[in-house]
Image (cartoon, rainbow, N blue to C red):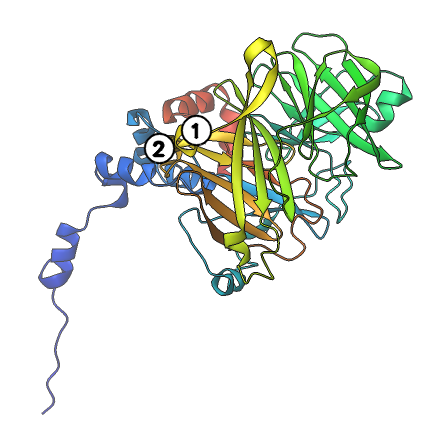
Amino acid sequence: MESTTSPPPPGSGITATLARTTRPWANLSPDLLLDISSRLDEEAADFTRFHAVCTPWRDVLSRATIRPAFSPWLLALCSGRITRSTVDFGCVSSFEEAGRGRGRGNVLLPEPPDTCSTDGGDMNWVASADGTAAWLLIASPEPRLLHLLTGAITPLIAFPEDDEIKVPMENARGIVYGDGTVFLYRFSYEESTPKFTAAILRPAATSWTVMKKILEVPTGPRSDSRAAYHDGKVIVCVGDFWSVLTRGDFGGLAGLQSRWNKQRNYSDECHYVLESRGELLWASVRLEPDWYDAGVDLTSALSVTVHELERGAGGAMRWAVRDGWSLADRILFLGSPASFAVDAHKLGMRGGRAYFVFGSCVYRYGLVVGENELVRQLPLKWGTGGEGRVWISWRQPTIAPIQEIREGLRLYPNKKQKLCN
């Protein structure tokens, strides 16, 4: 005679044990929720989704004394589209390992309206000096900035009708500084002679301050020509040559001087200018000469040097070498049109490092130890041309307290009905 086993009655055995020991997700310990929230520093979207799960998970934000700073994004053009690439900042890869993940983690951003892109990276990128925002400049019919994350439009004052200013601004890039100053500039070349055009819009100003100069420099066209607005002056850098221009200076020649007496030449160099703690820094990525013939791999052949603009004896401005230890508490993100530095503790990362893109790879250079590491390979067409490689360190998203949401629904009940539908 066959025997059958009846299921245990409700309220007994393993089912009852699980029911008694399993806590609902909403009742997790606030301390545990805070710990989880503090670790969501890779993506702002993950942080936002976590606190949108339920009321207790959202309320825990009010107890947080320190919120995570999100790891920077890397933006560039890939086949004419704006692409966001994720970077594992704790990763060290070989070329084989990095190549296998070349296309992973890349996200195409929506194509902004009224913009045109090319494979050459000629979009009019504008970035904040602290790396917390990025825009596209739309120069006509009226100039405005389009925020790459939110799509918000910031109208700007019309450019002067002078074609010597208005035409170059159609293809300008720029930097927005912490006080709200908008600095737009363009390098152009006619028969290998560099010309520099800039437009500066100070806070509360009713018109642009403009300048145009022919630059006297013994070098041909360069894709890494940089400019910055610092301490009321414009600093222009073309390769290893530089000059300080006075705001509003229009016309004529500007002679550029060498940053230092170079003891050796390099196979390639890329230059970046950034502000950090009130200092103006010039970072250079250098490729050792004859590295390939010497059997040196590309990663080991790359290095980064940093100089600071200071006033020397007699009041003359000069670039002084910065020791790696003096930057041990900072992380440099080198890109175009703006580079920036972040306090290492804010990102929970080791300081004294510089992240940069060379070719189609992301590298991390140790400014203290003097060693370079490959972090990731990028798609082959990613950032072609070298312009518009933008690091973005987004600010903490604002998440409304649940009390504020309830009050808003009470005052505007129609919104609640739409949400329920």
| Viewer-side residue, 172 vs 155 | 172
Residue 367 shows up from this direction: yes
Seen at 58% across and 54% down, the residue is 378
Q: Few, some or many C-alpha atoms within 10 Å of disc 2 (few <14, some 14-19, many ≥20)? A: some
The answer for how far apart the CA atoms under marks 2 and 1 are is 8 Å
Seen in the image, is 170 located left or right of residue 269? right
Mark positioned earlier in the residue sequence (2 or 1): 2
Q: Amino acid at mark 2?
A: Arg
| Viewer-side residue, 254 vs 108 | 254
Q: Amino acid at mark 1?
A: Ile
| Viewer-side residue, 139 vs 309 | 309
| Viewer-side residue, 259 vs 175 | 259
Q: Position of residue 18 (x, y in %)?
A: 16, 56
Q: Position of residue 116 (x, y in %)?
A: 78, 41
Seen at 70% across and 34% down, the residue is 225
Q: Position of residue 77 (x, y in %)?
A: 68, 46
> Can you tell which quarter of the image residue 307 is in?
top right
Q: Secondary structure at mark 1?
A: loop
Seen in the image, is 257 located left or right of residue 402? right
The N terminus lies in quadrant: bottom left
> Can you tell which quarter of the image residue 55 is in?
top left
User: Pointer 2 and pointer 1: residues touching (CB < 8 Å)?
Assistant: yes
> Can you tell which quarter of the image residue 47 is in?
top left
Q: Which mark is residue 399?
A: 1
Seen at 13% across and 81% down, the residue is 4
Give the residue number, with chain letter if any, for mark 2. Answer: 58
Seen in the image, is 188 located left or right of residue 93? right
Residue 86 shows up from this direction: no
Q: Which mark is residue 41?
A: none
